[in-house]
Image (cartoon, grey):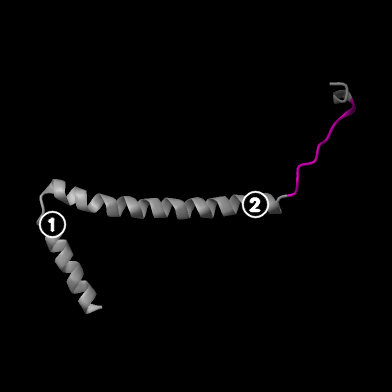
Amino acid sequence: MGGFLGWWDGVELWLTGLPFVLQTVVVMPVVLTLAYGAAAALDAVVDGGTKLRAHLRPPPTESTTEGEEGR
């Protein structure tokens, strides 16, 4: 663990030493990849939840009254 933390500190120091534009060029692909992965995971969870809810919910029953049959 100490080796990883030492490496991470070195990466941070290298990144903070870069000009802002180069920091953005280096960081944005990583951040966008992580954001896309989080969005895809959240989409899968929500989609699974809605499918489960639709599966567990009974189908709606149609109730007609005598006055509405002729429409």
Front disc: 1 or 2: 1
Residue 41's label in the rendered image is none
Residue 49 horizontal side relative to residue 30, left or right: right
Residue 62 magenta: yes
Secondary structure type for disc 2 = helix
Residue 62: quarter of image: top right
Determine the image quadrant of residue 38: bottom left
For the point 20% across and 48% down, the residue is 24
Q: Position of residue 28 (x, y in %)?
A: 26, 49
For the residue carrying disc 2, how many other residues have a C-alpha within 10 Å: few (<14), some (14-19), or many (20+)?
Answer: few
Residue drawn 15% across and 58% down?
Answer: 15
Residue at image location 21% in from the left, 78% down from the top? 2
Q: Residue at x 17, y 68 (%)?
A: 9
Mark toward the start of the polypeptide (1 vs 2):
1
| Residue matched to label 1 | 16
Say which quadrant the C terminus sits in: top right
Horizontal arrangement in the rendering, residue 48 relative to residue 15 (left or right): right
Element marked by disc 1: helix
What residue span does the magenta drawing correspond to? 58-66
Residue 66 is situated, as x and y percent measured from the top left of the image, at 90, 27
| Vertical relation: 42 (above or below) 61 | below
- In the depicted structure, whether residue 51 falls above or below residue 61: below
- Nearest the viewer among 62 and 41 is 41
Residue 70 screen position, x and y as percent: 88, 21
Tell me the chief SS of the magenta region.
loop
What amino acid type should be assigned to the residue bearing mark 1?
Thr
Q: Quadrant of residue 1?
A: bottom left
Estimate the spatial distance between the alpha carbons at disc 1 and disc 2, rounded to whole Å.
Answer: 48 Å
Indicate the amino acid at tag 2.
Answer: Arg
> Was residue 37 drawn as part of the magenta stretch in this picture?
no
Residue 53 disc label: 2
